[in-house]
Amino acid sequence: MSHTPKRKNNGLKLGYGPFLPKSGSTSSVKMLKKLGVEAGPSDDTVFTDHTFFTFLRHPLDRALAGYHQIEVFYHLGWIDAPIRKYNLQWWKTSCFNTTYGEGMETTFRCTGNVTMQHTKERLLRFNHFLDEIAMIGFYDEHITPLTYLIESSPVTHQAVKKPLVFDLQNFDVVKDVFTNLNAFAESRKLQDFDTAMAVFRNEVMANATTESNTRRNRLKSSPREMVRPKNKEAEKEGMHWIISQEDLVEWVNNSVPGASEALSKLCHMYRQDIECFSSYESSCCDEYLSPR
C-alpha cells in the first residue's frame, strides 16, 4: 500500500511508500496532508512521476511496538476475527490487572491470573505470543517484518524512482525540509522533487541564515524519541504489557526467567530485517544468531 494525492496538488509530487506500519506510517500520511496532499490508495499512474519516501525503524523496536499494538487491539476488541480464525491463545495465558478497554465489545476476555504487572507473567504472555506467530505466521501487518512489506509493496517494483528512505529518528528533520521545500516548489511552480531540490539547494540552502542553520543543526542533533501517545486513561490504568528492547536486554542480563527465550525468538523471527538493515546496532542478538 502507498499513499499519494487524490486531488490536484500545486506543490511537490510526493507519495508515501512502501507503507510500513509502526515505522512512522501514520505520521507520514499526516505530514502529506499538511503539505496539501490528500492521502489515499495509489493508482498505477503515480509511479511514473511521483517521488516516494518511507521511514525505517530498528527491527527489534518495531517488533516490540507491533506487539504493543496487537495488545491494544485486543483490549479494544478489534482483533476478535484473527483470534477466531487462527485460534489464538496468547491473550488468556495470564491477564492484566487493568481496566484498559473495559466496556468495549469483545468475545474474548481474559479471566485468569491478574498479576501481569510482574515481569515473570509479562514474559510468559509475550513468549506465548511469539510462539503462536512461529506456528501460524505473521497474521497482522503491524508485526510483519519490514523486509516482507518492502518486497511486497507496489512502490518497490513499479515506481520509476527509488523511494527515499530515512531513519525514523530523523522524522522531524525530514518534515522540516519537506515543508520548506514544498512551499518553495509551489512558489516556483515546480512539482518534480529532484528539480525542486536542486533549485532549493542553490538558491535557499546555500544562502541560509545563521538562524536557519542553527535550527537545522539542533534538529539533527536531537533525533526524535518515539514516545507512544499517552492519555489520562492509559496513565491511570497502565499498559502493563509494554516491553522495550532496553527492558528485554536488562532482564536477560539479570537472568529473569523467560527473558533470554523471548529475545532469542525475536532475533530469529526478525533475522532478515536485522541482517538487511545492519546499520541498526543489534549486538544483543549476536549470541542467538549463528553466521549463515
Image: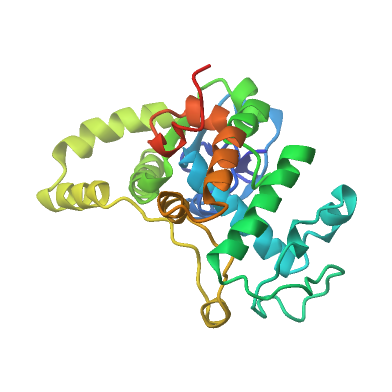
Q: Is residue 119 visible?
A: yes
139 relative to 212 in the view: left or right: right
Residue 39: x and y in percent read 61, 48
Residue 9's quadrant in the figure? Answer: top right
Q: Nearer the viewer, residue 1 or 57?
A: 57
Q: Nearer the viewer, residue 63 or 256?
A: 256
User: Which quadrant of the rendered structure holds the N terminus?
Assistant: top right
At x 62% / y 35%, what residue is drawn? 269
Q: 139 above or below 122?
A: above
At x 49% / y 47%, what residue is drawn? 61
At x 51% / y 32%, what residue is drawn? 288
- Name the residue at the left extreme: 210
Residue 229: x and y in percent read 50, 67
Residue 237: x and y in percent read 58, 80
Q: How many marks?
A: 0
35 relative to 262 in the view: left or right: left
Residue 221: x and y in percent read 23, 48
Q: 53 above or below 122?
A: above
Q: Is residue 23 visible?
A: no
Q: Nearer the viewer, residue 159 or 1?
A: 1
Give the color scheme: rainbow, by chain, secondary structure or one colour: rainbow
- Name the residue at the top extreme: 292
